[in-house]
Image: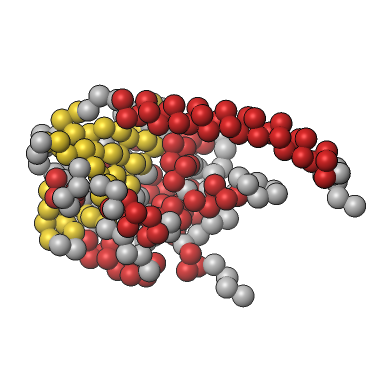
Amino acid sequence: MTAHLTATREEWLAARLDLLKDEKELTRRSDELALRRQELPWVRIDKDYRFETDEGNTSLADLFKGRSQLLVYHFMFGPDYTAGCPSCSSIADGFNGFVVHLENHDVAFSAISRAPLATLQAFKQRMGWTFPWASSFGSDFNSDFSVLFTEQQQREGGIEYNFRREPPLPQPLAGKTVQEGQSRDNEGPVAQFAALTGTDVATFTRDRPGLSAFVLDEGVVYHTYSSYSRGLDGLWGMYQWLDRAPKGRNENGIWWRHHDKYDRG
């Protein structure tokens, strides 16, 4: 017999309707937050960021490709990586399907990473992806949008990520997540991810994930929104499904990997 609560269909329906009230409230609240995102003030971008793309060397304005809006996913793939971050890769597995819909709704999309374009193209081919992916190698773009930090910032506590300043991390970072590393007393899974990208933990964690939004208005590019860390949960398709599965996320450590590394047996 199962240890989980069981019920009749009528009892289940009563409980489900009670839950539905809270789900509807969450949906309404989410709609309100979406409007507040749109109401944020815009910040003019005057720096001439340059990117390498499949179409050649381009500007930030060029990434709009004739559209008025641009969404950027800051994909963790530094110049020293041999493969993309497994978490970013899992999120990116969903990009192919929706990009065409965004593009037909006046919204351009691009992933942006620091690795050289040839490295990104090779990994993109390995993963079977088709979405636009630009290299910001040699640009200030990643650091300016708070997804790249230096070894000195790690050591001295100069990292401001997800709108919060992190404490210095003078001790070795091996085996710790960014958040767990701050507590200095927990072992975490980041060492596994670093190994999957061919780097050490310190190098791996100097790049960070995020999303940024931009608008092109009368020839001027403005930054409108950025989100980081758990703020990206809504983009992570598998978690939206798991949150509705009988056992939820049901996690005990790191279980996901690059999609071509699962045992297909």
Q: Is residue 115 shown above or below 181?
A: below
Query: In this orientation, which residue lies closer to the viewer: 7 or 145?
Result: 7
Residue extending farthest to the bottom is 265
Q: Is residue 125 shown above or below 181?
A: below
The structure's colour scheme is secondary structure
> Looking at the picture, how far across and down is residue 21, in whole percent?
64, 30
Horizontally, residue 183 falls left or right of residue 249, namely left
In the rendered image, which quarter contains the C terminus?
Answer: bottom right
Q: Is residue 140 shown above or below 196?
A: above
Q: In this view of the protein, can residue 112 be seen by the observer?
A: no
Horizontally, residue 148 falls left or right of residue 3, namely left
Q: Is residue 91 shown above or below 56?
A: above
Q: In this view of the protein, can residue 231 be seen by the observer?
A: yes
Residue drawn at point x = 43 percent, y = 28 percent:
33
Query: In this orientation, which residue lies closer to the viewer: 160 or 134?
Result: 134
Residue drawn at point x = 35 percent, y = 50 percent:
76
Occupied quadrant, residue 14? top right
Occupied quadrant, residue 93? bottom left
Occupied quadrant, residue 187? top right
> Looking at the picture, how far across and down is residue 136, in whole percent?
20, 50
Residue drawn at point x = 30 percent, y = 39 percent:
212
**How many discs mark residues in the rendered view?**
0
> Looking at the picture, how far across and down is residue 153, in whole percent?
30, 33
Query: In this orientation, which residue lies closer to the viewer: 12 or 138?
Result: 12
Horizontally, residue 204 falls left or right of residue 66, namely right
Query: In this orientation, which residue lies closer to the viewer: 131 or 33?
Result: 33
> Looking at the picture, how far across and down is residue 57, in whole percent?
11, 56
Residue drawn at point x = 20 percent, y = 28 percent:
43
